[in-house]
Image (spheres, grey):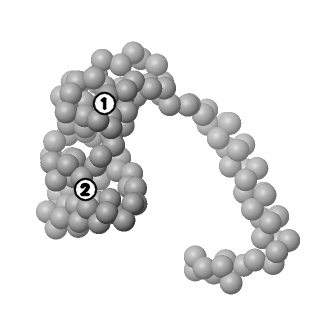
Amino acid sequence: FAVLSSDSRIIDMITYLLQQGRAAGLHFILATQQPKAKFVPTEIKINCDVRIALRMKSSTDSMVILDNPLASNLPPIQGRAIYQFGDDIELQIPLLKDDIMRNLLKDRKEELINLEEENNILEFGGEII
């Protein structure tokens, strides 16, 4: 996102997509590892109704995302976050360890392959034929 935010035309396009998406009931997920004001412009923040921030190192970083320092005051517990939609709510996001995630995805991949073979479904260029 940091690379994209350096071009004002891209920011304008993202802002337009967010506005149109909100009107159409679409949801967008924007993420950054560098919550700096230059990477998260006001135009983007205004068009994001819901914000989620995991624990942040500084109150300045928290201010960029939430407009308050709450994310910098979270306890050092993996998955602890601030959910902001009108009110600020502290919540615990489930944490899946890498090995558990790999096993879940492996099982689902095998299920999908079996389903495709059973139904003779072929995917070509993103379309099912």
Q: Is residue 33 above or below residue 73?
A: below
Q: Using the numbered discs, state the Cα–Cα distance from disc 1 to disc 2 in whole angstroms.
A: 31 Å
Residue sitting at 21 percent across and 27 percent down?
68
Say which of 125 and 52 sits in front.
52
Is residue 14 positioned above or below 85 on the image?
Answer: below
Q: Which mark is residue 70?
A: none
Q: Position of residue 11 (x, y in %)?
A: 19, 61
Report the disc number at residue 87: 1
Up-down relation of residue 101 to residue 21 (above or below): above
Q: Quadrant of residue 118?
A: bottom right
Q: Position of residue 58 (x, y in %)?
A: 23, 24
Q: Which mark, residue 3? A: 2
Q: Nearer the viewer, residue 108 or 102?
A: 108
- Amino acid beneath label 2: Val
Badge 1 or badge 2: first in the primary sequence: 2
Which quadrant would the C terminus be assigned to in this image? bottom right
**Rendered residue at 56%/31% (across/down):** 95
Identify which residue is drawn at 22% across, 61% down. Answer: 15
Q: What's the amino acid at mark 1?
A: Asp
